[in-house]
Image (spheres, rainbow, N blue to C red):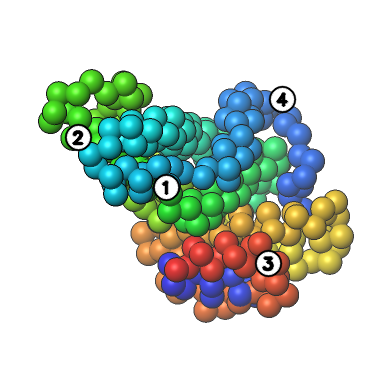
């Protein structure tokens, strides 16, 4: 992913589609409504997930005191009582990643179908679904940014697993064991071990979508992703389109979405996003510096590249 910054500083995507994708106000048509409603149920919970993650403080102090005083049963119980509900929250985040992956599958199924001849037609005529796809990517990068700056998440979960293992050895009943059993704990641990767990889940989900739909040419999916990147680029660089944004936050939104689709493309395409034959031409596509001057987006991009 070290070449990602080059993609974000590019000027020319091959055969750039020239239309405005209304990320702020697109509403579903009758043809889109069924998939849109399925995905909308998931997206309605996304803001709450981000709010919970942003407010996640962890049980660092209680854990430190318990470790420093291993013979003090009161401190052990206090640390355990603090960690168990936090682990329940981490479980909720992990389960939401699975819901998000399923929502992505539904959107990819619609946006890569044979309903229209090419991805440009899909994105232009199914703008509400394209908007939802963008919202999933925006949420994903925001979630991972918050996770990467919060070491308490992995510390809390590691302490939970160590304590649970010790309690089993000593035949001590664990009230929290039913909350996250051993099998689920293994999956959750692998999820949070990744630097960008939500993006990894979506990347794996996109790859799975391609492998499960062998009757669908892989180009349907990769062209959809590269076209979305191009649409974001065109809207950011075209004054007429930029002037239609009601909020400056839409600039950051477009940049985050572009990062997301480029990474998904890199995962799915056989030669990746950075090969010369890629529809995303790294050598030619350097974004103007002004598009990277948004502080929040710069922070996200830099963290994704580390």
Which secondary structure, mark 4? loop
Which secondary structure, mark 2? helix
Of mark 1 and mark 2, the one earlier in the sequence is: 1
Labelled disc at residue 60: 1
> Is label 1 or label 3 in front?
1
Labelled disc at residue 295: 3
- The 10 Å Cα crowd at callout 4, few under 14, some 14 to 19, many 20 or more, is few
Q: Which residue is mark 4?
A: 30
Marks 1/3: CA distance?
30 Å
Labelled disc at residue 165: 2
Q: Residue at x 58, y 51 (%)?
A: 142
Marks 4/1: CA distance?
50 Å
Marks 4/3: CA distance?
39 Å
Q: Residue at x 42, y 47 (%)?
A: 60
Q: Is residue 247 visible?
A: yes
Marks 3/2: CA distance?
43 Å
Could you tell me residue 156's position as x and y percent?
A: 37, 43
Marks 1/2: CA distance?
19 Å
Of mark 1 and mark 3, the one earlier in the sequence is: 1
Q: Residue at x 19, y 34 (%)?
A: 165
Which secondary structure, mark 1? helix
Of mark 3 and mark 2, the one earlier in the sequence is: 2
CB atoms of marks 4 and 3 within 8 Å? no
Of mark 4 and mark 3, the one earlier in the sequence is: 4
- The 10 Å Cα crowd at callout 2, few under 14, some 14 to 19, many 20 or more, is some
> Is label 4 or label 3 in front?
3
Which secondary structure, mark 3? helix
């Amino acid at each position: 992913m070290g070449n990602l910054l080059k993609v974000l500083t590019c000027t020319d995507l091959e055969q750039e589609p020239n239309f405005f994708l209304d990320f702020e106000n697109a509403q579903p048509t009758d043809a889109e409504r069924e998939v849109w409603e399925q995905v909308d149920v998931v997206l309605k919970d996304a803001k709450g997930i981000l709010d919970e993650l942003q407010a996640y403080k962890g049980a660092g102090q209680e854990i430190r005191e318990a470790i420093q005083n291993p013979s003090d049963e009161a401190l052990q119980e206090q640390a355990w009582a603090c960690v168990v509900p936090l682990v329940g929250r981490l479980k909720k985040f992990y389960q939401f990643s699975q819901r998000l992956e399923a929502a992505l599958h539904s959107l990819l199924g619609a946006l890569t179908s044979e309903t229209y001849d090419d991805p440009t037609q899909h994105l232009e005529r199914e703008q509400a679904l394209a908007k939802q796809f963008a919202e999933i990517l925006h949420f994903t990068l925001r979630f991972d940014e918050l996770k990467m700056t919060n070491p308490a998440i992995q510390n809390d979960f590691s302490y939970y697993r160590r304590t649970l293992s010790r309690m089993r050895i000593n035949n001590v009943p664990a009230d929290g064991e039913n909350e996250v059993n051993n099998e689920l704990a293994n999956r959750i641990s692998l999820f949070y071990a990744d630097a960008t767990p939500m993006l990894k889940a979506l990347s794996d989900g996109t790859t799975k979508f391609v492998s499960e739909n062998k009757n669908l040419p892989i180009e349907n999916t990769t062209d959809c992703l590269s076209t979305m990147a191009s649409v974001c680029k065109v809207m950011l660089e075209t004054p007429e389109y930029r002037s239609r944004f009601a909020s400056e936050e839409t600039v950051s939104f477009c940049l985050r979405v572009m990062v997301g689709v480029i990474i998904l493309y890199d995962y799915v395409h056989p030669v990746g996003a950075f090969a010369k034959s890629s529809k995303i031409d790294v050598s030619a596509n350097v974004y103007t510096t002004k598009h990277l001057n948004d502080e929040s987006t710069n922070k996200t991009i830099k963290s994704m590249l580390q």
